[in-house]
Amino acid sequence: MVEQSNRLDKFLAAEIKEFSRTQLQKAVQSGVVKVNGNFVTKPGFKLRKNDRVTVSKEKLISLISGQKKKFVVEPEEMPLNIVYEDDDILVVNKQAGLLVHPTLKHLRHTLVNGLVFRHPEIINVGENHLRPGIVHRLDKNTSGLLIAAKNQKSFLFVKEQFLKRQVEKKYLALVEGVPKNKKGTIKYPIKPSKHYRLKKIAVKKESSGKKSERLAETNYKIIKTFGAKFALLEVEPKTGRTHQIRVHLASIGHPIAGDALYGAKNEFSEKRHFLHAYYLKFILPNGSPIALETDLPEDLRKFLEGLNPQQ
């Protein structure tokens, strides 16, 4: 029973969490969902309070299983910067401009395609057929350290550390302007934008408690300033929301350089924003702690070198 007005696909995604919204949209289009006893094939169909939605779980599973078979990650040879590897996991220094995993629109030329070429056994690891082995993610235009698991036991072991917020992650970010405080914590919840599905927004007013509003916490401290134009920050997200660092820094008036989606105005790069995941600390599946650190990529380093501290 529908409790409040909503789109059909959004309602299904909230009620049936084991499938993605995209998968459920395709299921609706295939004619397996009824509203008040009538088949509905439009994912954006407007539901009203007290509407009754029915769907055969067996048909849904069968249909989505068929979808999965159509989208198999293809191995693809590509150079990968592996900074650590053992029998259980590997850690890659991902370049900017590279998607972490395939999507229904971009099935090739992703980090996962390269990982599957290097280690075919990864294809069956993880929780999603398009993200085999991937324990956490980085945005396409963010560079830096990323963990991939080579077997299911290791995947679950490392994933649990992320869920319990036991993994220490640090980023370097160049932001526009200089934050008022040398260090600080941002705790605004994050929710999807109503106007652009790829964008997130910070909830600055008192949280409504809606499921769409996800708690988020980000610590930052200033490392260096370049006059009043830029500041280099070390950023440590305590939660792992999509676009969290980008959203939080923009919410305090200091968007990341080059991040036009979140309001950056100064020209930096047509291909990326200035955000690099430079540090990871976690426990390996064999029980040993490990800390990894990587330098800024050449394009970010050269840009910094070209800035005047008195700018």
Image: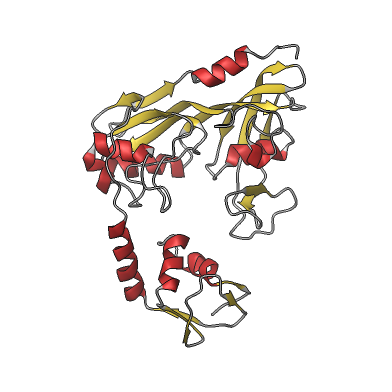
Residue at (53%, 72%) from the top-left corner? 8
Q: Position of residue 87 (x, y in %)?
A: 23, 31
Residue at (52%, 83%) from the top-left corner? 52
The part of the image, by quadrant, that contains residue 219 is top right
* Residue projecting furthest to the front: 270
Q: Position of residue 108 (x, y in %)?
A: 36, 43
In-front residue for pair 138/158:
138
The part of the image, by quadrant, that contains residue 258 is top right
Q: Is residue 294 left or right of residue 67?
A: right
Q: State the quadrant of the C terminus.
A: top right
Q: Position of residue 37 (x, y in %)?
A: 47, 88
- Image height of 200 relative to 143, above or below: below
- Image height of 222 relative to 126, above or below: above
> Is residue 149 visible from the viewing direction of this image?
no
Q: Position of residue 187 (x, y in %)?
A: 66, 42
* Residue projecting furthest to the bottom: 37
Residue at (60%, 58%) from the top-left corner? 212
Question: Which color mode does the image show?
Answer: secondary structure
> Is residue 47 visible from the viewing direction of this image?
yes
Q: Is residue 65 left or right of residue 221?
A: left
- Image height of 85 relative to 164, above or below: above
The part of the image, by quadrant, that contains residue 224 is top right
Residue at (38%, 39%) from the top-left corner? 110
Q: State the quadrant of the N terminus.
A: bottom right
